[in-house]
Image (cartoon, rainbow, N blue to C red):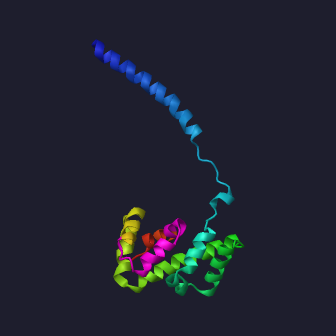
Amino acid sequence: MNRNTVRMAAVSAMAALALGAGAGLAQASEAPQARPAAAARTTLSAADARALLANPAISAELNTAEAQALRAVANGTATDAETRRGLSGAARAIFNLLKKSGKTLKAAAKAAKAGYSQLRAYMKGLPWYHPARVAWFAASGEIHYQLYLFLRDLAV
């Protein structure tokens, strides 16, 4: 063995020891924490609910229970169940607007399968007067994400 081989073996052994000891500490410090149930709640602000209710395309697609849930969120008196009902109703309304023009739904589902950023780019690329685009911009990020999850798993 020459001098360089011994030197490289010593450096490798020291690095393995340092990384091995440090990796255990790093794993312990980055251990996943249990999230409390309150942190897992979905959020919809009153301003977002008012914007959704003000959009006639979305309001036309909502049933009475979903509209009442969004009104409760807008007034600030909503329970968690009403917030979830309002979120799901708004996502369903945007989905129905996409479904009304068949090729738009297929293209949106294809974009969602490619990723959230692709879906967002597709929705931004729709004509400014398209009802689904207007509804997309009226909706909040949580509704965008719920719609993305649904379109991603949709078999079109």
Magenta stretch, main secondary structure, is: helix
Q: Quadrant of residue 54?
A: bottom right
Q: Is residue 106 left or right of residue 92?
A: left
Q: Quadrant of residue 1?
A: top left
> Residue 83: where, in percent of width, then height?
64, 72
> Residue 149: where, in percent of width, then height?
48, 68
In reply to whether residue 34 is colored magenta, the answer given is no
Q: Is residue 20 left or right of residue 65?
A: left
User: Residue visible at 63% across and 77% down?
Assistant: 70
> Residue 144: where, in percent of width, then height?
49, 69
User: Residue visible at 55% across and 84% down?
Assistant: 59
Which is more toward the observer, 12 or 129? Answer: 129
In reply to whether residue 135 is colored magenta, the answer given is yes
Q: Which residues are magenta?
A: 125-145
Extreme residue toward the left, this view:
2
Point out the image quarter for the C terminus: bottom left
User: Residue visible at 34% across and 16% down?
Assistant: 7
Residue 156, visible in the rendered structure:
no
User: Residue visible at 41% across and 66% down?
Assistant: 120
Q: Is residue 35 above or below residue 108?
A: above
Q: Is residue 7 above or below residue 144?
A: above
Which is more toward the observer, 80 or 49? Answer: 49
Which is more toward the observer, 126 or 33? Answer: 126
> Residue 76: where, in percent of width, then height?
70, 71
Q: Is residue 5 left or right of residue 148?
A: left
